[in-house]
Image: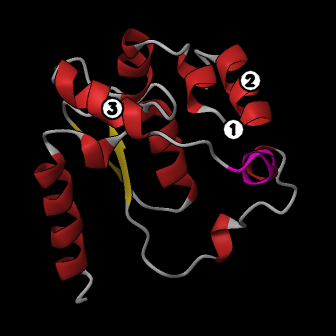
Amino acid sequence: MRKHPWGCQKFAVSGRPADMYGGTLAGARGLLFAPTTPESLVAESVARLQPDSTRAIIGDMVALNLVKTTRVKTPVLVLGGEHDEIYPPSVVHKTAKAYGTRATIIPDMGHSVTLEPEWPTLAGHIVSWLKEQGL
């Protein structure tokens, strides 16, 4: 968000993802995907993007009712993509620290981690963490 403040502001008002990444495949790749994601997958994913609720977006951005992370007593898994331009690894690590846990950064992934070719790596981290928690 810090690298693309104007696009994020436009997205918050319109709810249209294209406003955030400039409406181009190159912009979508840079903001949402890893550099190694196949062009066909980026194009396919972008074609399916739908507008988001501006009410929800603005509510998230100006939330005055922030989570009091020190009150959270349940285990929290914090994951991020190495190439995420919306929530870069530095932000993911700060989030993990706020919850008293560690972050795991998944290599070769952008923001759209479940759409990346390496999604099984992400799923493996989730399954391992759930097993560690006895779930």
Q: Dot 2 corresponds to which residue? A: 10
Residue at image x 39%, y 31%? 46
Labelled pair 3, 2 in contact (Cβ < 8 Å): no
Q: Quick one: label 1 or label 3, which is nearer the N terminus? A: 1
Per the image, is 69 magenta? no
Callout in the foreground (1, 3)? 1
Q: What residue type is labelled 1?
A: Gly
Within 10 angstroms of label 3, few (less than 14), some, or many (20 or more) residues? many
- On the image, the x and y values in percent for residue 109 come to 25, 34
SS for tag 2? helix
Scheme of colours in the image: secondary structure
Q: Which amino acid does label 2 sit on?
A: Lys
Q: Dot 1 corresponds to which residue? A: 15
SS for tag 3? loop
Q: Is the magenta stretch mostly helix, strand or loop?
A: helix
Q: Dot 3 corresponds to which residue? A: 110
Q: What residue type is labelled 3?
A: Gly
Callout in the foreground (3, 2)? 2
